[in-house]
Image (cartoon, grey):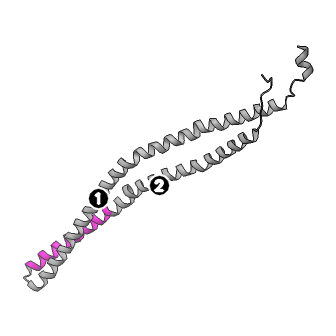
Amino acid sequence: MPSQAQVTSIESLESFRADLIIYLGQMLPALDEASGEVMRMRHWLQVEQRGFWDDQLRRRRRKLEEAQGELFNKKISLMNDSTVLAQMELQRAQRAVAEAEQKITALKKWTHELERLAEPLVKQVESLRGYLTGEMAMGVISLTEAIKSLDAYTQVAPPSAETKTSS
């Protein structure tokens, strides 16, 4: 049985450690990007689009009220030829309000769907981030310590043949 371990390639451990550090350096920004995209999508749906369509609904309802008032005024004044145009404008305003209401309903649905579909994936991404920053970082530290230990071990001179026979 040999009295000395056969350390042949500390360089391969160093290479693996370097590759692991590079991998961690690439994965963490990728995970940040994925999380950021989900946050941007949430913001776009919940804030930007919701605000836009709420504003559109207010404006379109105001136009609907104006069109209803205009039609009412035309009917009172007994100007039959102009009531047709006012009725068309009223129908156009009604369709615009209905469209805005449909958009808001769709936004609510998609906001809910985004949460339902994205939340489990976001949890997995966060779990992976925890693994990479915890376990994998500890792996890099362990590899560093192993490399130091092996390097120190290789620096120790092997026992000579005389020392073996005299014991």
Residue 17 percent location from the top left of the image: 68, 42
Residue 94 percent location from the top left of the image: 19, 69
For the residue pair 74 and 119, the one nearer the viewer reads as 119
Residue 113 falls left or right of residue 63 = right
- Magenta segment's dominant SS is helix
Residue 99 visible? The answer is yes
**Eyeballing the image, is 145 above or below 21?**
above
The reply to whether the magenta stretch includes residue 66 is yes
- Assign a secondary structure to mark 2: helix
Q: Which residue is mark 2?
A: 37
**Eyeballing the image, is 151 above or below 3?**
below
Residue 155 falls left or right of residue 116 = right
Q: Residues within 10 Å of mark 1 (few under 14, many from 20)?
A: few
Residue 154 percent location from the top left of the image: 82, 32
Q: Which mark is residue 55?
A: none
Residue sitting farthest toward the bottom: 81
User: The residue under label 1 is which amino acid type?
Assistant: Ala
| Image quarter in which the N terminus is found | top right
Q: Residues within 10 Å of mark 2 (few under 14, many from 20)?
A: few
User: The residue under label 2 is which amino acid type?
Assistant: Glu
Q: Which residue is mark 1?
A: 106
The part of the image, by quadrant, that contains residue 46 is bottom left
| Image quarter in which the C terminus is found | top right
Residue 82 percent location from the top left of the image: 13, 84
Residue 99 falls left or right of residue 20 = left
Q: Which residues are magenta?
A: 53-75
For the residue pair 12 and 163, the one nearer the viewer reads as 163
- Assign a secondary structure to mark 1: helix
Residue 76 falls left or right of residue 165 = left
Residue at the image position 77 percent from the left and 28 percent from the top = 5
